[in-house]
Image (cartoon, rainbow, N blue to C red):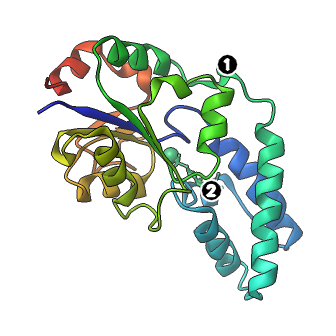
Amino acid sequence: NKTGFIFDLDGVIVDTAKYHYLAWKKLANELGIDFTEEDNENFKGVSRKRCLEILLEMGGLSVSQEQFDAWLVEKNEDYLEYISGMDETEILPDVTKVLDYLKTNKVPMALGSASKNARPILEKVKLLPYFDAVVDGNSVTKAKPDPEVFLIASELLGVNAKNCVVFEDAVAGIAAANTAEMTSVGIGEEQVLSEADYNFADFTKIDLKFLDTLIKD
Ligand code: B16
Ligand code: MG
């Protein structure tokens, strides 16, 4: 009956949302579309392809498959340039403290991210060794709010879905965790993540005693 912990990447472990925002804004402006930080909220936890579909809907544009794919590549190339200088200083406050505590207690841990760039980012910030499994945008066929990403993670950890705890900053991610019947922990604004079982503004608000209440051996 052991417990498994699953972490989202963007917005939970690192703040890559700001780099996604810059890359989407650059493309949007090239296409004559206004793109604000508020618009970027709807892109959190959402796959790259779906983000571009939403952007084109915002601009009332419909384009060929070829053009669509070219813009996907362009956005990602810009994003990769923005994240090229990332290092461990970009790990969000107290994340390493929580990961260390779980590692010391031999709790299985997985990454469950929509990003196809998750693995290189974990390498850059030197957190890859903490994870027993990495499930990312390359491993899934259905994006959050579909629970696929977290169900694959629970399988790889060998932990029942009901005994998994998911840390998420996106509405779509909390919905995915809830559908998978996992315990959902929202990181961010409580009003936005109201469907989560627990809410914390960030990891500095998470007490190690709270983690103990979630861990079953
Ligand atoms: P990529 P997460 C998500 O990561 C981001 O929140 C979302 O904004 C992004 O569009 C998506 O990854 C795809 O990322 O373009 O790198 O494949 O929050 O699920 O870790
Ligand atoms: Mg996220």
Please name the residue shown 73% across and 62% down the image.
35
The type of residue carrying mark 1 is: Thr
Asked whether mark 1 and ligand 1 are closer than 8 Å, the reply comes as no
Residue 82 % position (x, y): 80, 41
Please name the residue shown 41% across and 32% down the image.
132
Secondary structure found at label 1: helix
Residue 19 % position (x, y): 72, 44
Residue 29 % position (x, y): 84, 65
Q: Is residue 104 above or below residue 34?
A: above
Please name the residue shown 75% across and 67% down the image.
72
Please name the residue shown 60% across and 40% down the image.
119
Residue 183 % position (x, y): 22, 42
- Give the alpha-carbon distance from disc 1 to disc 2, as whole Å: 24 Å
Asked whether mark 2 and ligand 1 are closer than 8 Å, the reply comes as yes
| One can see residue 119 in this view | yes
Please tell me whether mark 1 or mark 2 is closer to you in this view. Answer: 1
Residue for badge 2: 40
Secondary structure found at label 2: helix
Image-based side of 99 in relation to 60, left or right: left
In the picture, residue 137 is in which quadrant?
bottom right
Q: What residue occupies the far right of the structure in this picture?
A: 30
Dot label at residue 89: 1
Dot label at residue 200: none
Closest to the observer: 8 or 30?
Answer: 8
Say which label, 1 or 2, has the lower sequence index. Answer: 2
Quarter of the figure that contains the C terminus: top left
Image-based side of 100 in relation to 185, left or right: right
Image-based side of 190 in relation to 95, left or right: left
Label 1 Cα crowd, 10 Å radius (few <14 / some 14-19 / many 20+): few
Q: Is residue 134 above or below residue 142?
A: above
The type of residue carrying mark 2 is: Asn
